[in-house]
Amino acid sequence: MKWYRKALIGLCSLVLLVAILNIGLNLWIKSQLPKIINKKNDSVYNITYKNLKVSLWDGDIQAYEIVIVPKAKHLNTINKIGIYAEIKSLKVDDFKIWSILFGDKIKAQSITIEQPKIILYTKNEKENIRESVVSSFDKIIAASDVFLHQCELKIVHTKTRKPILKAHNINLQLEGILITKQTLDNKIPFEFRDYAFSCDSLYFYPNEFYHLKTKKIKGSKTDVSVNHFEMIPEFSRREFVAKIPKEKDLYTLKCQSIKVRKMDWGFKKNDFFFHCNVIDLSQVAANIYRSKEPADDITKKYLYNKLLRDLTFDLKVDTLKVRNSILEYEEEKSFDLGSGKLSFNSFNLTANNISSGFKKKNLPDITIKINCRFMKSSPLEVNWRFNPMDTSDGFNINGTLTNFDTEKIVPFTKPYLNVTTKGIMDEIYFDFTGNDQKASGEFAVKYDDLKFTIYKNDDRKKKNKLLTFVANIFIKKDTKEKVKDTNVELERIPEKSFYNLLWRSISEGLKKILV
């Protein structure tokens, strides 16, 4: 027999042997995979599927119509706990045959999960999610990259049966995953090199008073964008007031878009940090409502210096921008009288050097610049500066309000003070320096033909002629085309906020000049 015939026969025999081994290994691996997935794994989940394909040549495993439920011994039909999921298909790429031959775990380069529908029932404990999700599935399969396509996710509280979180059409690309015994003990139970994330909508229920909603979210390791963010109260104003033992603000927030740029976040050992270059909020509509019917909250209100100084994590935001927005504040003595409203329209804010004092000795001043239209009409500009590391909680704030028609403030003064005003404040200036104890500084105003009307308490539509007459006698009607200035000094009320101190300082300046 000639040599090439021997070589051909030998080659054919080798190919045949490899084919037989491939078929044999495929059959063996197919028989082993169910054992690895269910019998040999010590996770709390049962995993079933309708079809399974294995290719040793390509190093691929594909499974279809997968169902995941807790194992019988962990299944509580009354109070569900854990993951219940249906997955259209799952593909494992470049799996390591030796991990199947000699181990009880599938190891691969990547996993691609198509159209999963996942419900996680939880007691709302952080450890529960860590153990139920990351730790459990790491016992079955490990991959460097995970790709999630068109996922529907819902997290439900086991007792209330209400959704804590809902997310629609999630797409996730997570690369460079590392899970070890050490990482499982960390705040984030795995490490990763990079990620990209998107979802079409999100609903989150953080507490009994509010729910959060968004439309499109896109995120990466460095950038995040959120469209149509909303924080909406769960209760009406009357219901909210009935539920709170002490006075407390009720917030309604809507924002057309939020963009975070060049961020870096994570943990250094056990210390969380969040750093970013810019947070940009566009077209915010913020309403703050306070009822005076509940008892006063007499706890001390700390200034922003201390609040940032005492934050328990490392925060650093180079620039915060709020653009083309509206801010409303409403205060109400009783529901019968209605609320007084202050509004700041066309609101623009730029804040620089926002940092926490966590494990720091020195920080640059935080500077805040604001320009807006007060009560929809008058230009208002404010400059505000303070330093988180100043233990006296010192600050400086100055501003200018021009061409203010005092009738514009009637939506606040009439329901809240039972007073209306007429006249033009041509110019108002203030420059106050203060700390946790007091505030002092300069106040100046120029105004024309100022008049007050005071109404009866028992009939708020009728004018109290006597009080109106007396008030207009004692109040100077104008400054005779000059800017009148005065010095202001007053003690801070510890139970009141920074804004109360600012308002009282302005009010004190007005009182000195008007009367």
Image: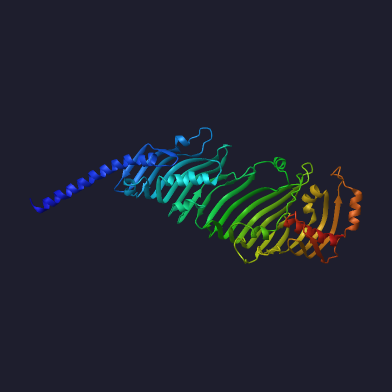
Question: With respect to residue 152, does 324 lie above or below?
Answer: below
User: How many numbered marks have been drawn onto this rendered protein structure?
Assistant: 0
Picture quarter with the C terminus: bottom right
Seen in the image, is 62 located left or right of residue 456?
Answer: left
Seen in the image, is 38 located left or right of residue 365?
Answer: left
Residue closest to the far top: 77
Question: With respect to residue 379, does 206 lie above or below?
Answer: above
Q: x, y percentage for residue 264?
A: 53, 59
Viewer-proximal residue, 476 or 250? 250
Question: With respect to residue 359, does 3 lie above or below?
Answer: above
Viewer-proximal residue, 313 or 241? 313
Q: Residue at x 76, y 64 (%)?
A: 430
Q: Residue at x 12, y 51 (%)?
A: 6
Residue 364 found in image quarter:
bottom right
Q: x, y percentage for residue 299?
A: 73, 52
Q: x, y percentage for residue 213?
A: 58, 46
Residue closest to the far left: 1
Q: x, y percentage for residue 108?
A: 37, 50
Q: Residue at x 53, y 55 (%)?
A: 224
Figure colour scheme: rainbow
Question: With respect to residue 47, does 354 lie above or below?
Answer: below
Residue 179 visible at all: no
Residue 305 visible at all: yes
